[in-house]
Image (spheres, rainbow, N blue to C red):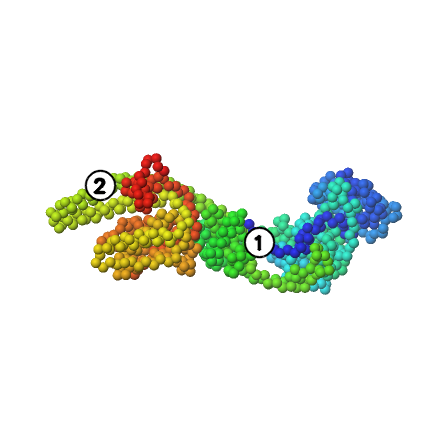
Amino acid sequence: MSVSAQQSRTPMDHACAKEPIHVPGAIQPHGYLATLDAQGRVAQVSANIDRWCGHAPDRLIGAPLADALGDKPAAMVADALPRLQEGETMVLGVVDANAPAAARDGDAAPRAPGGWFVVLHQYKGVRVVELEKAQHQGDLYNAMYPLVQDFLGGLQRDIEISELAVLAANQISKITGFGRTLVYRFDHEGHGHVIAEALRGDLPSFLAQRFPASDIPAQARQLYRLNRIRLIPDADYVPAVLVPALHPDTGAATDLTLASLRSVSPVHVQYMRNMGTAASMSMSIVVGNTLWGLISCHHDAPRIAPFETRTACAHIAQILSLQIEARDLQFEAAYRLSLRKILSALLAQMAKTDSFVDALVADKDDLLAFTASTGAAIVFEGRITRIGETPADRDIEKLVDWLVEQPDDIVHTDRARDVCAWMADGPIAGVLAVSLSKVFRNYVIWFRPEVIQTVEWAGDPRAKLATLSDTLSPRESFETWTDTVRDRSMPWLAAEREMAFEFRTAMLGIVLTRAEELAQLAMALGQANRELEDFSYTVSHDLRAPLRHIHSFAALLEEVDGGNLSTRGQNFIKRILTSSEFGGRLVDDLLAFAQMGRAALDVHELSLRAIVDDVVAGEARLATESQRDAEHPREITWEIGDLPRVEGDATFLRLALQNLVSNAAKFSRKVAHPKIEIGTLPANEVPAQYAGQHVVYVRDNGAGFDMKYAGKLFGVFQRLHADDEFTGTGIGLAHVRRIMERHGGSVWAQGAPGKGATFFLSLPLHYRAQSGVRETPAAAVARLAATGELSPTGGVRKGGRHEARTKNSK
């Protein structure tokens, strides 16, 4: 989908766009016209028909066609009608000027000597016959061939489109004798750009200048596309109206779209006068059924181009159209091939890694070259990875919000600053985005910078002729007017947009393949997890009782016979007590860790400050109790900064913070003045990969750790200190990591031996649920056990009371 800024349009533009120029109700008087009814009789004639046949127009309505045109033209038409198809134009031949039968009456107006072409066409069910002056009698094609053979010879050279345009302008100028011949093409906004010019007189040059799209409104472009040539031999002509105004069979004005004699809009005639042009002729350049441009001839005095000359020029325009289309297709094919090679390289790189984001980052040059961009952003799973020149993360987040609202999966604009106001002050003006998942807001986005252009217009496109009406009036001045165009990038080519679509298709294929692989792996892991869960319950059930017995009997032995044991025996009992207590904690922690990944999160918006205050209060009480009998108690200094409101599971987030705060207290207990800080990193200090997320830290001044072991901190059973120095099961930080992963966040740490440690938690601004997570009853029990809400006997603690569960409870 292409997104463009809303263009300002004047009332004149809207009025011109609605003007019914295809049904003017009149023709130009350098020829004659008649329409036929269903029986092939005269339905309408041009008011100037009396000069041809000597009869008043109203006397001819319903008469045989021979009365209006003569026997020979009527016979040509009768012979051709059975073969005539809708939308087809047929040149039937040449008749002598003295052919009409009505000339015998002696009342026909005098006419110039020479022949007249008889042309027949049918459009919207109405058959139209036109008579136009011929320059030569005889074979049309033999007359035309010498006029175009020079042009055809020039096409044998391998030249660019601009050189083709110069060749066409020069050749048509020679053929027609018009004082100025222009070739101009339309850009993607409809403005015309003069790319070639041939001057034979004193008319001013328009080479390299531009004409605004409003000069040729939409319905005029449609006419140019359907009728490839238009002649206005005299801007001061008096139209010959159709008699009657409405076609008897249709009851409507006759559509003269395909009529070469069609009268033109008064606005356009005034436009010609303002331009200093008395006569004009235009040929359409149609490429792929789209109006690519025009060949426009101007003269400073009335000038008629005979039918054969116009036919030759129309053929040159048609050949030029085919040549341009061939070269465009050749360029497009070559460009697509180069882009497809880059796409193949990107896909090959992605096939080597499990993460397509890492693959694209590793091959960033190809990623940017793929769309001729200067920057790119990969938005995946809530994270933004930027490459090259891009907007800031906060602007990309707003851009994704906007992209999600667009109906298409591929969105492009070269006016991003206009359609996305928050990017107005940034370096980017062009955006091409492909959606990998709107639901999960996954996008690959390419960016282009602003390209400042100085454009010369053939007159100020905003000006208009003040003496005409406020609704239909052309501009008056065509003097060079310079404009500086800003806030736009280079437009996205069709090949780039199509290859972006192929990129998306390939990416979805990769994602689907990975999803299938992950689904198979998930099934295997699910089975393993179920076995692990069974094993965990077995361990919990079978080992808890023996461990309690060991601990209980060792305690009794110490109490009853401890005094009778040797010092060595007493040490053995203490080791038994310590080991059995540790084994019990280890079994409980293992069970909770195994089930944590399956427990569903109860997500709400919550205050981290409230959770932290509760955790700190509990930790402070424990610290006070543990040091009550200490010879030199060390009171912890707490510094708690601003903490955000977040979306998450309050129970799990409390458990994560409890683990970090407990660790901070534990590893600071040997410091003379322990200090623990809890707060939120300011936005300018947040690492780039976590930009746009809440980052909370827990910092202590305790034992610290060596950063070379930082990668081991969050693994199961990974401990960096001796058991007799700091106790623990080595599972707490693994709990924290799993909780943060379940919330779409991360955890990491920084530290130094003897200088404390800082642990960081990142949380997305908005929680996005992971698919396929369901909480089984066993998982719910595990979650409650992990958070201390489950009593040792299986009941739920509420308000300090123990409430037993029944088998039917839910």
Residue 793 placed where, x, y %?
28, 40
Q: Is residue 701 above or below residue 59?
A: below
Residue 710 placed where, x, y %?
32, 55
The span from disc 1 to disc 2 (Cα, nearest Å) is: 74 Å
Query: Contact, CB < 8 Å: mark 1 with mark 2?
Result: no
For disc 1, the marked residue is 4
Looking at the image, which residue sits at the far top? 808
Residue at 28%, 42% (x, y): give it.
792
Q: Considering the numbered disc 1 on the image, is that residue within a helix, a strand or a loop?
A: loop
Q: Considering the numbered disc 2 on the image, is that residue within a helix, a strand or a loop?
A: helix
Tag 2 or tag 1, which sits nearer the N-term?
1
Q: Is residue 363 visible?
A: no
Foreground residue among 142 and 228: 228
For disc 2, the marked residue is 546
For label 1, count other residues whose C-alpha is less than 10 Å away and answer few (under 14), some (14-19) or many (20+): some
Tell me the kind of residue under disc 1.
Ser
Residue at 52%, 53% (x, y): give it.
432
> Relative to residue 520, is residue 725 drawn left or right?
left
Tell me the kind of residue under disc 2.
Pro
Foreground residue among 453 and 77: 453
Quadrant for the C terminus, please: top left
